[in-house]
């Protein structure tokens, strides 16, 4: 992320700095190099790594007045949320004992959470898409109000009802006919992040789903040491759930008052020219080292665009005061 500072990327040097090009008679305006104009800022609650280059600023809160790019890679799926089950004819919270993962059905969800569920996560009693007329879909500008939540990085799930799905060897989930992950805190987090941008682009990259295809049993899971484990919120693992991308996108558009773009990572990278094609075999005979490098690059692109893997990430691009680049304005 690039906070605003004196001499932003749009600012040319003073007239006194205009110099004659050594390659011709025309006059060109001198500009500072890209490295001179950019400041990198990492937002993270963990301690700053010892070997991090000094040029990278480290903070626990999203800076205000950003001019440039805000990149949130698999951040939103760690923002704590509540889980609800559709039981006894309505939505009720799922409660969990943090140290064991034992679940019980709690009371009815709040009015705010019920409103979110009605809009974004259809219940079994209503057809998909019939709950409410939803605005703010892909490339929509029909969103005009925002939220003001003070999120920086993903906070610990203290006090959250993050809970585990039924898992072999774990306590049984209360019997219900539907389960939902209430994404309202993520909408607020993304809206807050977008609101910190003065001019630029916010990009969220995450696994997620859309309203017409919400998972009936939810997506909550845990990871420890790179392995999937039961999502018990005892601080021993990373508890995560996929993101309701259309809901988040609508919240960001409401703050930016500007259309967003939403696509799968596979589509986004291919639009940027990453096709993952193998280099011609003839290159191996004329430039063996170049062939190996090109083959490695093609392999990396293939991994990044695999729909069953990393290519399944969603890319949400929210401009603020600018237009989307042609290559990604889909």
Image: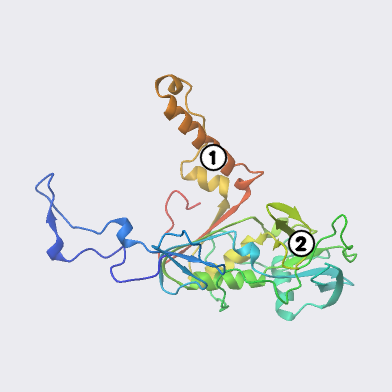
Choose top left, top right, bottom left or bottom right for residue 103: bottom right
Distance from Cα at disc 1 to Cα at disc 2 = 30 Å
Q: Position of residue 187 (x, y in %)?
A: 61, 70
Q: Nearer the viewer, residue 83 or 234?
A: 234
Give the residue drawn at x 42%, y 51%.
326
Q: Nearer the viewer, residue 266 or 122?
A: 266
Q: Nearer the viewer, residue 102 or 305?
A: 102
Residue named by callout 2: 231
Q: Nearer the viewer, residue 176 or 73?
A: 73
Residue 103 higher or lower than 30, as above or below: below
Question: Around disc 2, counting alpha carbons within 10 Å, would you say few (fewer than 14), some (14 to 19), or many (20 or more)?
Answer: many
Left or right of 93 in this view: 326: left
Quadrant of the drawing holding the N terminus: bottom left
Choose top left, top right, bottom left or bottom right for residue 14: bottom left
Give the residue drawn at x 51%, y 32%.
277
Regarding residue 129, the answer to whether it shows in the image is yes
Q: Position of residue 323 (x, y in %)?
A: 41, 60
Q: How many marks?
A: 2
Left or right of 302 in this view: 102: right
Q: Position of residue 241 (x, y in %)?
A: 70, 61
The secondary structure type at the circle numbered 2 is loop
Q: Position of residue 20 (x, y in %)?
A: 11, 53
The secondary structure type at the circle numbered 1 is helix
Numbered circle sitting on residue 286: none
Question: Around disc 1, counting alpha carbons within 10 Å, would you say few (fewer than 14), some (14 to 19), or many (20 or more)?
Answer: few
Residue 91 higher or lower than 218, as above or below: below
Residue 275 higher or lower than 241, as above or below: above
Regarding residue 305, the answer to whether it shows in the image is no
Residue named by callout 1: 300
Residue 280 higher or lower than 240, as above or below: above
Choose top left, top right, bottom left or bottom right for residue 218: bottom right
């Amino acid at each position: 992320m690039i906070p605003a500072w004196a001499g932003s990327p749009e600012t040319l040097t003073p007239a006194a700095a205009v110099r004659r090009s050594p390659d011709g008679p025309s006059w060109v305006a001198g500009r500072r190099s890209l490295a001179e104009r950019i400041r990198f800022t990492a937002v993270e609650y963990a301690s700053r790594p010892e070997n991090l280059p000094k040029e990278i600023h480290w903070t626990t809160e999203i800076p205000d007045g950003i001019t440039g790019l805000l990149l949130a890679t698999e951040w939103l799926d760690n923002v704590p949320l509540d889980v609800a089950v559709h039981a006894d004819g309505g939505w009720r919270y799922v409660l969990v004992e943090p140290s064991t993962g034992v679940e019980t059905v709690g009371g009815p969800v709040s009015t705010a959470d019920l409103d979110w569920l009605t809009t974004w996560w259809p219940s079994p009693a209503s057809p998909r898409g019939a709950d409410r007329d939803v605005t703010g879909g892909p490339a929509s500008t029909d969103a005009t109000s925002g939220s003001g939540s003070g999120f920086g990085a993903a906070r610990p799930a203290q006090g959250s009802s993050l809970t585990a799905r039924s898992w072999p060897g774990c306590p049984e989930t209360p019997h219900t006919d539907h389960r939902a992950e209430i994404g309202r805190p993520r909408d607020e987090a993304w809206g807050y992040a977008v609101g910190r941008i003065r001019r630029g682009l916010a990009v969220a990259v995450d696994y997620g789903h859309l309203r017409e295809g919400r998972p009936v049993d939810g997506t909550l899971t845990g990871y420890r040491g790179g392995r999937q484990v039961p999502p018990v919120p005892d601080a021993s693992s990373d508890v995560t759930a996929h993101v309701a991308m259309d809901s988040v996108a609508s919240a960001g558009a409401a703050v930016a008052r500007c259309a967003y773009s939403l696509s799968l990572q596979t589509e986004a990278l291919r639009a940027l020219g990453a096709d993952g094609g193998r280099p011609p075999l003839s290159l191996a005979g004329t430039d063996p080292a170049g062939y190996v490098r090109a083959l490695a690059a093609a392999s990396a692109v293939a991994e990044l665009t695999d729909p069953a893997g990393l290519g399944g990430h969603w890319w949400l691009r929210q401009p603020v005061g600018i237009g989307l680049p042609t290559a990604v304005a889909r």
